[in-house]
Amino acid sequence: MWVARSARQHSQSAVNDGARYRVPVIDVTAGLKVLDIADFRSRVSATVTRVITEQTPLLHSVSADLDPMITSIAGLMAGGKRLRPAFAYWGYRAAGGNDSDQAVSAATSLEFLQACALIHDDVMDGSDTRRGLPATHRIFESLHRDAQWQGSAESFGVGAAILAGDLCLSWADELLFTSGMEHDALLRAKSIYDIMRTELMAGQYLDLLEQSRASANVDRIRNVIRYKSAKYTIERPLHMGAALASASDETMSTLTAYGLPLGEAFQLRDDVLGVFGNPDETGKPSGDDLREGKRTALIGFTAEMSSDAGYVLERLGRSDVSDEEVATMCSIITECGALARVEELITEGRDAALAALESSTLTTDSIHVLANLAVAATDRKF
C-alpha cells in the first residue's frame, strides 16, 4: 500500500517508490499547486468573476441598494481552495473527458454551491469571520448598525445572509445548466447534483442537531462528517464530473473508494485546524471551533478518553471563554490522546484514498492529480 510521507522521507525513497507503485511519488510541499495544472484555479476564478459581473446589471435594475449583496458575495468568493470544482473537473478527466471551458464552467457551479453552504453555515454557527473577512451576516449586521436603521441589526444580518446564500444557490444551478455541456451529459450530472444537495442539507441539519445535544458521540459525529463533508466535498463532485463524461460503474466505484475516506480525512483536518490552526493561515481566530461550540471528532474522542472532559464540555460554545481557558482545553484534548487519534484517522483516510488509485483504470493524468490532491487536502495548513 502506498503511504504518504514527509518531504524528507519522500526524497530518501523516491527511486524505490517510483519503481514499486503506479501512483507517483508525491512531494507534500507541492500543496495545492497541483490545481495549477491546466491553469485550473485561474479559470475557476475567472468564471466566478464572469458570473457575478453578468448578474450585476440584473440586480442593479432592481435597486442600487443591492450593491452590498453583490460585494459581499464577490468578497467571499474571491478566496477559497477551489477543491470542489477541482474534484468535479478531475472526476470528468478521470472518466476520459477532454479539457474544455465548458467542463470548467460546469465544475465551477460547485463553487457557488459552496458559497451558499458557507454563508448559511456561518449563520448557524454564529461565526464572526470567514476567510479572514467578516462573515456575511456580520457584514449586513454592521451595515444596519452603522446606518442606524430600525429593528434588530442582528436579525437583519441573518436575514440578508440567508438571502445571499440562496442567491448563490440559484446561480450555481444557472451556471451548471448554461455551461455549454451537452444536454445528455447535464442530465447525467444533475442526478448526482440532486443527491449531493439533499445529502448536504441533511448533513447540515444533523450537524445543527449535534451541536444542540449535551453529549458528544463519536459515531454520530462521524456520520455528520460523512454527509456534510466527505460526500459533498469529494465523492459527489467526483461522481458529478465523471457523469458528465459518461463514466462506467467501475470508475464510479473507484472514485467512491478514493473519495469517501479522503473526504472524512479532509474534514478531520478542518476540525484540527479549527482548534490548533494558525490564525494567519486559517483566517479564523485560534480555538474558534471551541468558542463556537462545535462538537467535532476532537471533542467526541476527548469525551471518551479524558477524565477532564467535563472541563472542556462545560466551556464549549461559551463566547466569553478566556484565552487561558482555551489553552487549557487544547491541552486536555492533546494530553488525553484525542488529537493523536484524529491524526491517525486522517492518515488512514488519506492512505485508503491513495490505495484506491493504485490498481484503478482511471486516466494517468487524473491519477497523478488526484494523488496530489489527497496529500494537499490532508496536509494543509488552511
Image: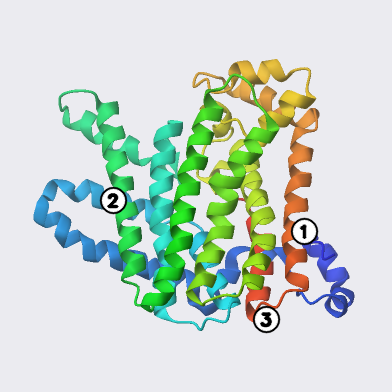
Task: Check disc 2 and give the amino acid type.
Answer: Leu
Question: In the rendered view, does 163 fall on the left or right side of 282?
Answer: left
Give the colour scheme of this rendering: rainbow
Question: Residue 108 sits in which quadrant?
Answer: bottom left
Measuring from the top left, give residue 309's x and y in whole percent. Answer: 72, 20
Task: Check disc 3 and give the amino acid type.
Answer: Thr
Q: Residue at x 60, y 30 (%)?
A: 295
Give the residue at mark 3: 364
Measuring from the top left, give residue 324's x and y in whole percent. Answer: 63, 21
Badge 3 marks a residue whose secondary structure is helix
Give the residue at mark 1: 351
Are the residues flagged by discs 3 and 1 in contact, CB closer than 8 Å? no
Task: Check disc 1 and give the amino acid type.
Answer: Asp
Q: Residue at x 29, y 46 (%)?
A: 164
Who is closer to the viewer here, 223 or 273?
A: 223
Q: Is residue 300 above or below residue 244?
A: above
Question: In the rendered view, does 11 fall on the left or right side of 252?
Answer: right
Residue 52 in sight? yes
Measuring from the top left, give residue 371's x and y in whole percent. Answer: 69, 68
Neighbours of disc 3 within 10 Å: few (<14), some (14-19), many (20+): some
Q: Is residue 277 above or below residue 354?
A: above
Q: Is residue 188 above or below residue 272?
A: below
Tag of residue 167: 2
Real-space Cα separation, disc 3 to disc 1, in angstroms:
19 Å
